Amino acid sequence: MTQTSAGTVNPVLRVAPAAPAEAAAHFRASLVFHADVSDVAAALAPDGDPGFVVLDSRSTASWDQGHIPGAVHLPTALIREQAARLLDRDVPVVTYCWGPGCNGATRAALALAELGYRVKEMLGGFEYWVREGFEFETWQGRERRVADPLTAPVEGDCGC
């Protein structure tokens, strides 16, 4: 265990970091399963086919409250019976739900993977889509809010 200069146990290093090769494998695997909001938004730019479909796994009331333009609405509970009718197995799916405090997108991704779809989960969900200032749709039309400076750069991109 690593100790601080005051002689107390350093809580960050209480469990040592993984070896570099092990860490690389872990983070590579994470990128296989996840996409972030800004990457999804950039890929959905109107210049053509992004190569994937975005799936909103929330309820109809939640969908009506706001969703990503162009997303397919398929609540998690209906995936097994309706996925084949709404989704092409040859096109990867990116799932989302409310946000980081909700695992609905994870459950939807699991259900789709079990049906044979290639799938990723969008980190941050609808919450971070809106907080980062991307356009969304409601039953009343399209909206966009000012980006939250705690989640997105005020000018330019984050550089990550």
Image (spheres, helix red, strand yellow):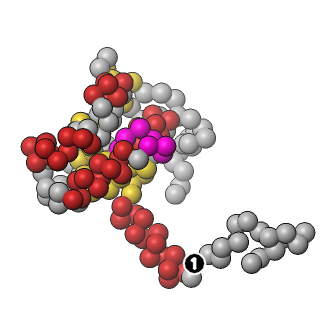
50 in relation to 4, above or below: above
Which percent across, then down, holds residue 84? 10, 48
The number of numbered discs placed on residues in the rendered structure image is 1
Element type at mark 1: loop
Q: Is residue 97 magenta?
A: yes
The quarter of the rendered structure image containing the N terminus is bottom right
- At a point 66% along the width and 73% down the height, the residue shown is 15
Residue type at mark 1 is Ala
Residue denoted by label 1: 18
> Quadrant location of residue 62?
top left
41 in relation to 89, above or below: above
Instruction: Tell me the chief SS of the magenta region.
Output: loop
Task: Report the front residue among 102 and 65.
Answer: 102
Which percent across, then down, holds residue 28? 42, 70
Q: Which residues are magenta?
A: 96-102
The outermost residue toward the left is 85
Which percent across, then down, holds residue 22? 50, 80
Left or right relative to 25: residue 55: left
Left or right relative to 80: residue 148: right
- At a point 40% along the width and 69% down the height, the residue shown is 29
- At a point 38% along the width and 32% down the height, the residue shown is 135
Task: Report the front residue among 93 and 98.
Answer: 98
Callout 1: few (<14), some (14-19), or many (20+) C-alpha neighbours within 10 Å? few
